[in-house]
Image (cartoon, rainbow, N blue to C red):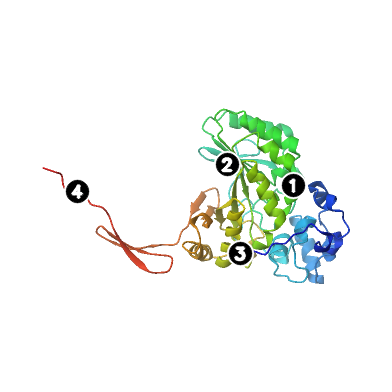
Amino acid sequence: MVQKRLKTSSSERASLWEKVPDNEWGNWQWQQANRITTVAGLDSLIELTSEERLAITAAGERFKFAITPYYASLMHPTDRSCPIRRQAVPVAEELRAVPDELVDPLGEEASMPVPGITHRYPDRVLFYTSHNCPVYCRHCNRKRKVGDPASAAHRLQLMQGIEYIRGRPEVRDVLISGGDPLTFSDDRLEEIIAGLRDIEHLEIIRLATRNPVTLPQRITPAFVRMLSKYPPIYVNTHFNHPRECTEEAATALGLLADAGCVLGNQMVLLKGINDNPGLVRQMNQWLLAHRCRPYYIFQLDPAEGTNHFRTPIESGLELIRGLRGWTTGMAVPHYVVDLPGGGGKVPVQPEYLVKKEGPVYTFKNYEGETYDYREGVDSPECP
């Protein structure tokens, strides 16, 4: 059973924040304003060696780090293999160059007809709206610009993006992404969503956000009331480990679902963090119980400084084998590789077809047993 970690009473927070009043702890702006952004701040939460301090400083200069008090309180203070710590705290491996790593691993900039819009697929676009995130995940595939103020999308750029979509009747689906678009105020985000919903040919609006994981306080009743005015809204979030499946996260998902949002999870496969079928099955069952459908397992994109997180493709196939048949099909996401250079997403699945002889197909099921399936044949015509 997934461990539930309730982080609302002062006794259950990291000692650094144990005296913070509940009304401040539960305020997303307070969480954002009090993020850990320095080595000294980390040192007050977790045990660091002198070598780690130097590595964190050097890696943080290349890709800044910030951790909300809520998410930092999920870290184990002494275990360096803690899945929360590994996702949020810089390490020396980020500085080691690997030949096939890329600054822009998905070729997003090459498919950008106007600033902030990536238009690769025929009927949908990605809308880069914000460079900010509550937590800067160390495996981020957009670390080339996420966290960089120079990549901030000013209001004119956002309006130009909306007008680009308005002028492309083939576009029926937009993914609002970043950074994290929920770092905007409700009013600014509503301006974007309302502008998109006003486009007659646009059917689907999606929000890509990790706030339910790293800053669930951001999902407020006022926020979801705003979203409920512009259906359908699809929310793709990003849980990677059962330790992130807290009661605060459950509350955030519940508010979104009650407001009519359709929820999906996009997990990134990370070495030593979630490359374990039992762990992923546990997390996905928790997500379904909280009305969030496991949607994708992504093979890690080869962004610079992420090689220490990368797994073999076989690890992803093993995850699918450990899910298919062993739990409900609704808990089995698509395992995909987003091809470097802009090739797009391709699914990768275990092979269950063993052979074909004439009209007979032989399949192997989830337990490794084989079964024959005979194709139907045309009935003879009646005289």
Mark 1 or 2, nearer chain start: 2
Q: Badge 1 local density, few (<14 within 10 Å), some, or many (20+)?
A: many
**Picture coordinates of residue 291 (x, y %)?**
60, 50
Mark 4 or 2, nearer chain start: 2
Q: Which residue is mark 4?
A: 379
Mark 3 or 4, nearer chain start: 3
Q: Is residue 287 above or below residue 158?
A: below
Residue extending farthest to the right is 19
Point out the frontmost of discs 1 and 2: 1
Cβ atoms under marks 3 and 1 closer than 8 Å: no
Disc 3 element: loop
Question: From mark 3 to mark 4, how far is it between C-alphas?
Answer: 51 Å
Point out the frontmost of discs 3 and 1: 1
Q: For this rendering, which residue is in front, 91 or 215?
A: 215
Going 87% across and 55% down the picture, which residue do you hit? 20
Q: Is residue 227 toward the left or the right of residue 285 in the image? A: right
Numbered label attached to residue 111: 2
Disc 4 element: loop
Q: Is residue 181 toward the left or the right of residue 341 in the image? A: right
Question: From mark 1 to mark 4, how far is it between C-alphas?
Answer: 61 Å
